[in-house]
Image (cartoon, rainbow, N blue to C red):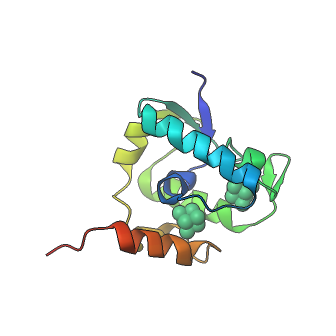
Amino acid sequence: MSTLRLRPHHILCLQTFRGSGYSPDFVAGMKKIVAELKENAETSLQIVNICDDICHLCSNRNGWSCTSLRPSIFDVLVSGRYNILPGKEYTWKTLLSMLPPLSLELLEECCPNCQWLSLCRQIVSEETPVST
Ligand code: SF4
Ligand code: SF4
């Protein structure tokens, strides 16, 4: 299996994906990658700071760049806080272990003002067990 390319903040997006996205093609691409990672957590991913295999089918992509400025900020936040370094390769299992579990705090910290934030907050709220 070939190594997938992944932007740092997409570690979160892959976990919150429930079928919504920018276009049917984008959603189909996301579904394929999510299924691949679910089936094999040892899948290798190379961290990049340009457009990745998820961006590939996104209408916001322009060559190797994203037309939105925010994703690059999210990448810097995830990369800097969790030491996930562009150019390095990690398995999906390792990447999951390098970040805390999904939580509202993690979303606020890593994806401020994302256009999908309210949806992701709802998903995390509904699926995260309330601690007692
Ligand atoms: S809020 Fe945005 S960047 Fe964060 S996980 Fe959701 S879609 Fe990804
Ligand atoms: S919005 Fe930008 S970073 Fe997000 S998937 Fe599309 S091209 Fe990639």
Q: How many marks?
A: 0
Above or below, comparing residue 100 to residue 3 in the picture: below
Question: Which residue sits at x=76%, y=66%?
Answer: 68
- Report x, y in % for residue 96: 39, 46
Q: Is residue 32 visible?
A: yes
- Extreme residue in the left direction: 132
Q: Quadrant of the C terminus?
A: bottom left
Question: Which residue sits at x=41%, y=34%?
Answer: 41
Above or below, comparing residue 88 to residue 75 in the picture: above
Question: Which residue sits at x=23%, y=74%?
Answer: 130
Q: Quadrant of residue 117?
A: bottom right
Q: Is residue 108 visible?
A: no
Q: Quadrant of the N terminus?
A: top right
* In this picture, residue 91 sits left or right of residue 54: left
- Extreme residue in the top direction: 1
- Report x, y in % for residue 67: 81, 62
Above or below, comparing residue 132 to residue 95 in the picture: below
- Extreme residue in the right direction: 62
Ligand 2 placement by image quarter? bottom right
Question: Which residue sits at x=52%, y=35%?
Answer: 36
- Which one is in front, 81 or 27? 27
- Which one is in front, 54 or 32? 32
- Report x, y in % for residue 46: 57, 35
Q: Quadrant of residue 23?
A: bottom right
Q: Quadrant of residue 95?
A: top left
